Image (cartoon, rainbow, N blue to C red):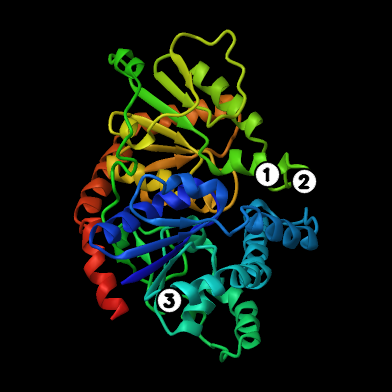
Amino acid sequence: MRVLITTLGSPSHGRAQLPLARALAAAGHEVLVATSPDLTAVFEHDDVRVTSPISDSIPVYHAANALKELGDHPELDAEQQSALRMRAMSQALSGPVARELLDILLPLARDFRPDLILRDGMDMGSVVIAELLGIPQLPTPSGTSNTIDPADMLRGLNIVREEYGLPAHEDPLSIVPQGRVDYVPPAFSFAKHLPASWAYRQTVTVDRRSVLPPWIAELPTDRPLMFAAIGTALPLVRKKAQGEESAGLPSWVPDPVDTLRTIIEAASLLDEYTVVVATSGVPADTDGLPPHVHITEQLPQPLLLESVDLFLTHGGFNSIRESLRTATPLAVLPQFGDQHSNARRVQELGIGLEVADPTPDGIATVCRDVLADAAIGANARRARLAMLTLPEIESAVADLEKLAG
């Protein structure tokens, strides 16, 4: 079986796909990953072919243009503005992003002749490619798949279909005719609009070479251990915003430098904890930090979460799943995209709280409230038990073989 995997966005999208790619390759199937140059490193240590024809700025560029066309709407509340941004994102993904990806990926797919496509949640072009080639396609776990409403993409995608001589569809769920892949059980799903999935167990450690630094073992264990991180997507957006052709960060994306500064100030207030803060390479002022706060650029998050009492997170879907797998209570400080929706779902499931007041005092208060609430810890443990009922990721191979015929 030949499997084409498409990966866009941030490295977290690739890490969500890597266990599937690894399992398929180990079973003897030929796997080709089509991604951007920035993301090839995610797959470089595994037995898969990687090509990088996709510009890493495609989704950001077209989404930013769609949002500019919307203009400012100060009359809308935060939730309404978020919904408006998601509709703009849907229009971009189903129109210009899909067209550009089709131009890039269709010749590659015709040459590779895949039996199955596992696509990034932002890749609507591969929906059309699968229809042209008469093969199945499944989106892999991503915040985009969880939050985008297929109904908002139907019109744009039908226009693209007709441009390629395909019939239009009436069902919005035609973007997932074979379902989707997920790593959480249905009871803990974060998908707002998509049906039940092919669910497999979240892998604890995706990077098999990962190891925690020795200084972690020297941290005091007589107090709660808190981990804080801003993820990979926000720094990546900042990097793109600093490019020669960029006009700066979009108005709907917070500056990661400001976010990190606020997190460190909040950590400094929590002197009853030991706090580890991962910067993801974002510049941070570490002068005068209290001894209970430890700053590092990065470390293997899934490993550390196995021993963490509280995770202050931006609310990316990878981080959410890793927390569910390790029963780690959450304080969610959402920044953009699906993270606001994820924060609300975390609170709805009772496995953590959303930070509504993004000041140092507000963040510190939520962190204390999460650890003081025994029900949150109990719900987190219940979620981990539910995660453990899912079949291991290797079982996906037989399912995908049947799907591909």
Chain-order first, disc 2 or disc 3: 3
Across and down, in percent, residue 255 comes to 67, 36
**Residue at mark 2:** 246
The spot of residue 108 in percent (x, y) is 52, 70
Question: Which residue corresponds to the image point at 54% horizontal and 63% vertical from the top-left?
Answer: 122
- Rounded to the nearest angstrom, the CA distance separating label 2 from label 1 is 7 Å
Q: Which of marks 2 and 3 is in front?
A: 3
Alpha-carbon distance for marks 2 and 3? 37 Å
Q: Disc 3 designates what residue?
A: 113
Residues 370 and 291: in front is 291
Nearer to us in this view, 128 or 254: 128
- Residue 303 is situated, as x and y percent measured from the top left of the image, at 31, 33
Q: Which label's residue is closer to the chain start, 1 or 3?
A: 3
Q: Does residue 362 lie above or below 122 as drawn?
A: above
| x and y percentages locating residue 272 in the rendered image | 40, 15
Does 277 appear above or below 1? above
- At 52% from the left and 59% from the top, the residue drawn is 144
Secondary structure category for the residue under label 3:
loop
**Numbered circle sitting on residue 156:** none
Density class for disc 2 (Cα within 10 Å; few <14, some 14-19, many ≥20) is few
Q: Which of marks 2 and 1 is nearer the N terminus?
A: 1
Q: Do the residues labelled 2 and 1 touch (CB within 8 Å)?
A: yes
Q: Which amino acid does label 1 sit on?
A: Lys
Quadrant of residue 284 within the rendered picture:
top right
Dot 1: what SS? Answer: helix
Residue at 37% across, 76% down: 115
Q: Is residue 218 left or right of residue 154?
A: left
Whether residue 67 is visible: yes
**82 horizontally vs 246: left or right:** left
Mark 1 vs mark 3, foreground winner is 3
Q: Name the residue under label 1.
A: 240
Q: Quadrant of the C terminus?
A: bottom left
